[in-house]
């Protein structure tokens, strides 16, 4: 079965391709020559994931899923959350976002945080929402050179390493995206029966 992942993020595509089952052929927006800017203006992860999936669904006859992910830090009332990509400003990179996060948490002993991924699937015209969460803590400084985004400052519960110190296969065993993907598989297998892992 062919399914479109409504994203241009090559890291996420790589992560999902490394997990996806044999029964699914994952197509990117690039594969479909879709170059339009996908809106991400909703106040929640669920709203954004659904808006992205609906936007791309208008451009293709194939089934579509989209994701939105946020880092939710307890001591910051859930920030950066839906603003994770542009926490430090509209055109800021991950490094600036991490700098801001660490400065806002400086001296704070509550380092609890979680990554939350929401997938919105549009399958044969029906919409489904799935969520994956990984709990963890924010370090005092960056560690590791792998991964992307906030990976260098996030240690998942039960580990001593940040996501950026892990091989992709290790991150995939516990990550928010992998957990949301498990639920996506379960839903696709229920609906279609061929997207097995
Ligand atoms: P997006 O809107 O789903 O692309 O995610 C928003 C932001 O969350 C990204 O720009 C990254 O900074 C961060 N993010 C998403 N997933 C991850 C991850 O697996 N590790 C680290 N940061 C992530």
Image (tube, rainbow, N blue to C red):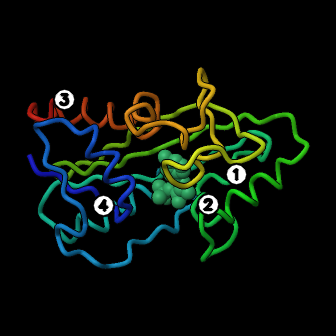
Residue 5 locus on image (x, y percent): 27, 56
N-term-proximal mark, 3 vs 1: 1
Mark seen at residue 6: 4
- Residue occupying image coordinates x 38% and y 61%: 9
Q: Can residue 148 be seen here? A: yes
Residue at image mark 2: 83
Q: Secondary structure at mark 3?
A: loop
Q: Quadrant of the N terminus?
A: top left
Q: Earlier in the sequence, mark 4 or mark 1?
A: 4
State the residue at coordinates (46%, 35%): 175
Identify the disc placed on residue 79: 1
Mark 3 highlights which residue? 197
Disc 2 to disc 1, how far (Cα)?
7 Å
**Cβ atoms under marks 2 and 1 closer than 8 Å:** yes
| Above-or-below relation of 147 to 114 | below
For marks 4 and 1, give the CA distance. Answer: 24 Å
> Whole-Å distance between the Cαs marked 3 and 4?
21 Å
Is 85 left or right of 77, judged from the image as shown?
Answer: left
Decide: is 45 above or below 74: below
Residue 47 in view in this figure: no
Q: CA distance from mark 2 to mark 3?
A: 32 Å
Whether residue 91 sits left or right of residue 103 in the image: it is left
């Amino acid at each position: 079965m062919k399914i479109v992942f409504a994203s241009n993020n090559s890291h996420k595509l790589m992560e999902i391709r490394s997990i996806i089952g044999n029964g699914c052929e994952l197509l990117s927006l690039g594969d479909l020559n879709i170059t339009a800017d996908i809106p991400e203006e909703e106040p929640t992860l669920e709203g954004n994931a659904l808006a992205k999936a609906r936007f791309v669904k208008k451009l293709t006859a194939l089934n579509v899923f989209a994701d939105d992910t946020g880092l939710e830090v307890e001591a910051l009332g859930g920030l950066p959350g839906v603003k994770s990509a542009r926490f430090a400003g509209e055109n800021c990179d991950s490094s600036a976002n991490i700098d801001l996060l660490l400065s806002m948490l400086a001296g704070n002993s509550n380092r609890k945080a979680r990554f939350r991924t929401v997938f919105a699937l549009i399958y044969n015209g029906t919409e489904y929402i799935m969520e994956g969460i990984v709990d963890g803590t924010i370090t005092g400084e960056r560690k590791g050179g792998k991964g992307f985004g906030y990976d260098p400052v996030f240690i998942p519960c039960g580990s001593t390493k940040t996501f950026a110190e892990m091989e992709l296969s290790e991150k995939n065993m516990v990550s928010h995206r992998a957990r949301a993907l498990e639920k996506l598989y379960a839903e696709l297998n229920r609906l279609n029966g061929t997207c097995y892992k």
